[in-house]
Image (spheres, grey):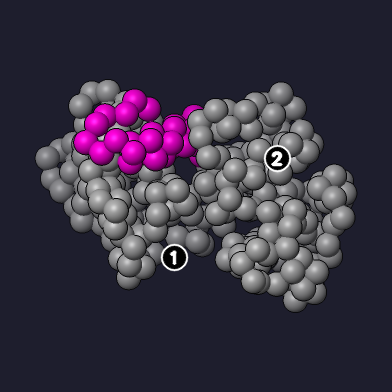
Amino acid sequence: MKIGFIDYFLDEYHANHFPEWLKEASGGEMQVAYAYAKIDSPLGGMTTDEWCAKYGIPRAATIAELVEKCDAIVVLSPDNPEQHEELCQIPLASGKPVYVDKTFAPDKASAERIFAIAQNSGTPCYSASSLLFAEEYRNIGRGKVANVVSFGAGKVETYSVHQIEPIIYLMGPDIERVMFTGSNTHESYVCEYADGRRAIVTHHNDWGVPFGMAVGLTDGSSKLLTVESSFNVPFMAGMVRFFRTHESSVPHEDTVAGIAVIEAAKKAAKVPGSWVAV
């Protein structure tokens, strides 16, 4: 199965690792056959041609050419979600399975427009945080969590998806409002559900801080979870399964709900201590 990579620029962590991970997860059945990038790396990394030469992956001149020659598509641009709507136009109208990297979109309206392209053309697609597949979260199961204090590294714009998507998996998508409670150096916010349940999300600049959460279960017990499992293995296995069966591991409704929460969190950061509706 020929997989095509579409990226804003190719020399980034996901593009550099996904080819080997996909090959391993599929037992060699799936290989990245073509790659396309809108621009060369603006961060001083390899150019598109240099990246293609290093990884032995032919460069497609256009997105249309790549989609025509491949059986399935990965739209990357993990740190530039504002590029996804443009990069997804042709792939999501193709009918071929498309995985769109995190963070799916910069706001709820964009997320809904992107999924609408796929819906109108009958194209199977999904997006997901790799952390969503960590066995620490999956072992609890959905619907058994009453409250959460979540922690992890990175900024809200690009890394809150790794906390919000597991929260939505465990507690549901109906977060009603968000309040920013952090500072200039440590971002944090409270997510409140329609029924009064709350999830507190904290971001740390130090990458020595792992992802995890303190979980209050509906039976009154509590657990402290620190993600130590190799979450990229089940994440990639899910992508391989999707390319084979066209069955997504993540409902579109959950993805849109997560983007709406992140959008509200960014708005809430401008008015600390005030509730912002999701």
The answer to whether residue 184 is above or below residue 216 is below
> Visible in this render: residue 127?
no
| Residue 179 x/y as whole percent | 26, 35
Instruction: Give the residue displayed 43% in from the left and 53% down from the top.
Output: 159
Q: Residue 120 falls in which quadrant of the image?
A: top right
The residue wearing badge 2 is: 86
Q: Label 1 neighbourhood size at 10 Å, few (<14), some (14-19), many (20+)?
A: few
Answer left or right for 117 relative to 152: right
The answer to whether residue 234 is above or below residue 118 is below
For this rendering, which residue is in front, 20 or 102?
Answer: 102
The answer to whether residue 272 is above or below residue 63 is above
Instruction: Give the residue displayed 38% in from the left and 35% down from the top.
Output: 267
Q: Amino acid at mark 1?
A: Ser
For this rendering, which residue is in front, 185 or 158?
Answer: 185
Q: Label 2 neighbourhood size at 10 Å, few (<14), some (14-19), many (20+)?
A: few
Answer left or right for 16 relative to 223: right
* First to last magenta residue range: 250-278
Q: Is residue 273 magenta?
A: yes
Q: Is residue 42 magenta?
A: no
Q: Amino acid at mark 2?
A: Glu
Q: Earlier in the sequence, mark 1 or mark 2?
A: 2
| Residue 229 x/y as whole percent | 39, 64
From mark 1 to mark 2, how far is it between C-alphas?
32 Å
Furthest-bottom residue in this view: 54
Instruction: Give the residue displayed 58% in from the left and 66% down from the top.
Output: 13
The residue wearing badge 1 is: 230
Secondary structure of the residue carrying tag 2 is helix
**Image label count:** 2
Which callout, 1 or 2, points to the residue nearer the camera? 2
